[in-house]
Image (spheres, rainbow, N blue to C red):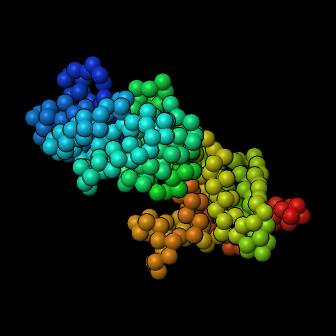
């Protein structure tokens, strides 16, 4: 589960108040100094104020261009970005031209994005697509164009439209981006629960004006979670043929209560079903829990505790230079592990452990159902 510092490192703490005051901004900066936020996202006109009055503030600075509507002339948007570069910002969140996107005038949109990418050189760029105005096909096209033009992030919202981000937005972006571009969820994210929900859905960064309050909530939640009963999860997966018909099973043991989850697929490997079992177990809980997971899968145990950090550093490439198998499942699993407080326990297969034998049997039965159907 995230600790306060690790969660803060996922948050762009935002102050984009249209009618704020220096006093309010000072209070924002004081709160920001309490935690290592990923960056501070502030209006262009307040960047000189930070430089003049908070010389020792050690944060990356993000700011905005074409904000919040995105339909200014390209020359105007580029001039804004040039000003931000002169001010020394580290990252720029800019609004794309939605008129061009929705009208399918992709040549103009691509030309503007290439111009922004060129002028900003190696700066991190986040293209805001304002998902509340888009259909799924529009989001797909926006994803492809932003990837094609070399933009680093796709960002859901400005916070000034009819709604902010939704989990469905993130899921749609994730479906089409397939890890080729990072995702920033923003707009209306006010609570720890919302933050964890968006990160679990696939967001890489959260943009919120409630960053301080969210971290304080996590500190309180952590104390509560530490006092919760630890729930035991027994998981297993099976593939008849490897690959072949697959099944997975989960036994949830909370005190005297037991609950079984199971499922399967017509074609899968053992490793995929082992991962699906764990993912299904963790996904079952909608609030952070203290969980102890028992598995006989060395692939899962070593993957989580040893391999995953190394894979991430290499861009999901193995030590011998090959793409990591089942990458999408590993990415989902990592997000869920960060949502909960998880301990891992290796069980020897077929060693007489009652619950391990039980989920093994159910997983095989689930796989056999697919063999009968196909």
Q: Is residue 194 above or below residue 146?
A: above
In this rendering, would 64 be left or right of 22? Answer: right
Count of numbered tags: 0
In this rendering, would 167 be left or right of 274? Answer: left
Q: Percent position (x, y) of residue 105? A: 45, 40
Q: From this viewpoint, is residue 218 visible? A: no
Name the residue located 36 percent from the left edge and 33 percent from the top edge: 70
Q: From this viewpoint, is residue 134 visible? A: yes
Q: Is residue 19 above or below residue 311?
A: above
Quarter of the image holding residue 369?
A: bottom right
Q: Is residue 352 above or below residue 80?
A: below
In this rendering, would 190 be left or right of 240? Answer: left
Q: Percent position (x, y) of residue 297? A: 65, 70
Q: Percent position (x, y) of residue 98? A: 43, 34
Q: Is residue 99 above or below residue 59?
A: above
Name the residue located 24 percent from the left edge and 49 percent from the top edge: 119
Which residue occupies the extreme right position in the image?
A: 372
Which residue occupies the extreme left position in the image?
A: 52
Quarter of the image holding residue 24?
A: top left
Name the residue located 66 percent from the left edge and 65 percent from the top edge: 272
In this rendering, would 368 be left or right of 213? Answer: right
Which residue occupies the extreme bottom position in the image?
A: 320
In the rendered image, the quadrant that contains the C terminus is bottom right
Q: Percent position (x, y) of residue 252? A: 71, 51
């Amino acid at each position: 589960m995230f600790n306060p510092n690790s969660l803060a490192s996922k948050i762009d703490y935002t102050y984009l108040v249209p009618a704020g005051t220096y006093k309010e901004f000072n209070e924002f900066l004081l709160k920001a100094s309490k935690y290592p936020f990923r960056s501070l996202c502030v209006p262009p006109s307040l960047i000189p104020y930070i430089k003049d009055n908070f010389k020792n503030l050690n944060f990356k600075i993000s700011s905005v261009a074409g904000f919040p509507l995105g339909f200014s002339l390209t020359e105007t948007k580029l001039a804004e970005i040039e000003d931000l570069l002169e001010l020394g910002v580290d990252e720029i969140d800019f609004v794309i031209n939605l008129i061009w996107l929705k009208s399918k005038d992709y040549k103009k949109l691509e030309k503007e994005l290439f111009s922004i990418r060129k002028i900003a050189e190696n700066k991190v760029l986040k293209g805001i697509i304002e998902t509340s105005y888009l259909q799924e096909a529009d989001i797909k096209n926006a994803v492809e164009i932003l990837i094609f033009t070399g933009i680093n992030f796709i960002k859901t919202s400005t916070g000034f439209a009819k709604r902010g981000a939704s989990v469905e937005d993130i899921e749609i972006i994730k479906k089409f981006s397939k890890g080729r571009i990072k995702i920033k969820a923003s707009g209306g994210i006010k609570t720890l629960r919302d933050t964890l929900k968006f990160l679990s859905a696939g967001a890489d960064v959260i943009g919120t004006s409630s960053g301080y309050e969210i971290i304080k909530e996590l500190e309180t939640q952590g104390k509560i979670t530490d006092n919760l009963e630890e729930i035991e999860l027994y998981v297993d997966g099976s593939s008849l043929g490897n690959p072949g018909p697959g099944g997975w099973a989960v036994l949830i043991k909370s005190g005297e209560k037991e609950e079984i989850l199971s499922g399967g697929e017509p074609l899968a490997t053992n490793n995929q079903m082992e991962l699906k079992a764990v993912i299904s177990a963790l996904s079952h809980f909608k609030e952070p829990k203290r969980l102890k997971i028992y598995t006989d899968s060395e692939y899962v145990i070593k993957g989580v505790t040893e391999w995953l950090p190394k894979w991430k550093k290499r861009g999901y490439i193995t030590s011998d230079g090959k793409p990591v198998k089942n990458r999408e499942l590993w990415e989902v699993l990592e997000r869920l592990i960060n949502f909960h407080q998880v301990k891992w326990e290796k069980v020897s297969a077929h060693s007489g452990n009652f619950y391990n034998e039980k989920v093994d049997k159910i997983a095989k039965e689930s796989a056999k159902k697919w063999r009968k159907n196909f």
